[in-house]
Structure formats: C-alpha cells, structure tokens
Amino acid sequence: MERVTISLEDALLEEFDAFIRRKGYANRSEAIRDLIRLKLERDRLDEERAEHAVACVSYVYNHDQRELARRLTQAQHAHHDLMLSTMHVHLDHENCLEVAILRGRTQDVRQFAEATMAETGVRHGNLHLIPAEVVTSRHRHGTDEAHHEHTHTRPAT
C-alpha cells in the first residue's frame, strides 16, 4: 500500500471530518478509499466501460395491479441467467417490496432493471449497479482432489 499526502482547505477538511464521523468511518483513509472507489465505479458506468456488473434492484409494487405479479415473475424467469436471488416482503394488504440480486453483462442487467421498474404498478424502484470483473480460476478444494476451473465475479475496484 502506498502513502499519499493531500492538501485540503480548512473548511473542506472540517466538512469531510464531520462526514466521516456521521458515517462511522474509523479514519480518513477508509473514507477516502470508499469515495475513490465510488467515483471510479460511476466513471466506468458513465463511460460504458463496465462490461459486467452485479446489482441490486429494489422496488415496491401493488400486487393487486392487474397481472403485475405474474408479469414480474415471468420476466424473472425469462432472464434467469441474470437472476441470483430474490426476496419478497409483504408490506401491507396491497404493497410488496421485492429485491432482486442480479449478475451479468452491464447492459443486460440495466435493461432488465429499468424494464422492471417501468412496469405499471411498480413504484419506488432503485438500481444499485456495481462494475464487476469475471475471473476464471483453477482451485483444489482438498488434498486429494483434482484441480477444477470455475468463475468468480468480483467488484472491479
């Protein structure tokens, strides 16, 4: 790890220190690393340089909306290659909160999430997209087992 020195105006440093206290950071370095990662991720997404991503799409919908629950389920099945997991919570007699964890090509993940959030009856949708790398590696899981290859998805930063 390399040490870096930066200069900040007093007012900016005071505001930053208040920020890290509010957010519970242990020190300035941790906060700065997270802010840099966030900016690099946004830049990759804005510049369309993130080929793969992992994501969380969350939305609230009215389950009484005509055929909406069926359409949402059908869309998830049609895109099973993107779906890692879903969680469904009943908020009240009409409203449900659903969270889907996605993984795949960034463009495909974004299109699926946006189409889901655009469905009539879906509201309060949010997509949290994280640029990712897909890495193939060889592993041996026991002393007598042969090596095997599999892929891992990890954050790009």
Image (cartoon, rainbow, N blue to C red):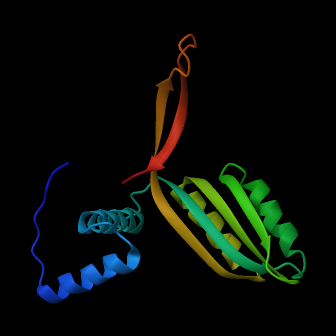
Left of 96 or right of it: where is 17? left
Residue 7, image x, y percentages: 9, 74
- Name the residue located 55 percent from the left edge and 30 percent from the top edge: 150
Left of 89 or right of it: where is 35? left
- Say if residue 119 shows up in the picture: no
Residue 72, image x, y percentages: 79, 67
Q: Is residue 3 above or below residue 121?
A: above
Residue 3, image x, y percentages: 13, 55
- Name the residue located 52 percent from the left edge and 58 percent from the top edge: 106
- Residue 54, by quadrant, is bottom right
- Name the residue located 78 percent from the left edge and 71 percent from the top edge: 89
- Residue 60, by quadrant, is bottom right
Q: Is residue 153 above or below residue 62?
A: above
Left of 131 or right of it: where is 124? right
Q: Is residue 12 above or below residue 104?
A: below
- Say if residue 137 shows up in the picture: yes
Q: Nearer the viewer, residue 100 or 75?
A: 100
Where is the C terminus found, in terms of image quarters?
Answer: bottom left
Residue 70, image x, y percentages: 87, 67
- Residue 39, by quadrant, is bottom left
Left of 55 or right of it: where is 99? right
Number of on-image labels:
0
Please, which residue is most extreme toward the bottom here? 11
- Name the residue located 54 percent from the left edge and 60 percent from the top edge: 107
Q: Nearer the viewer, residue 132 or 35?
A: 35
Q: Nearer the viewer, residue 75 or 102?
A: 102
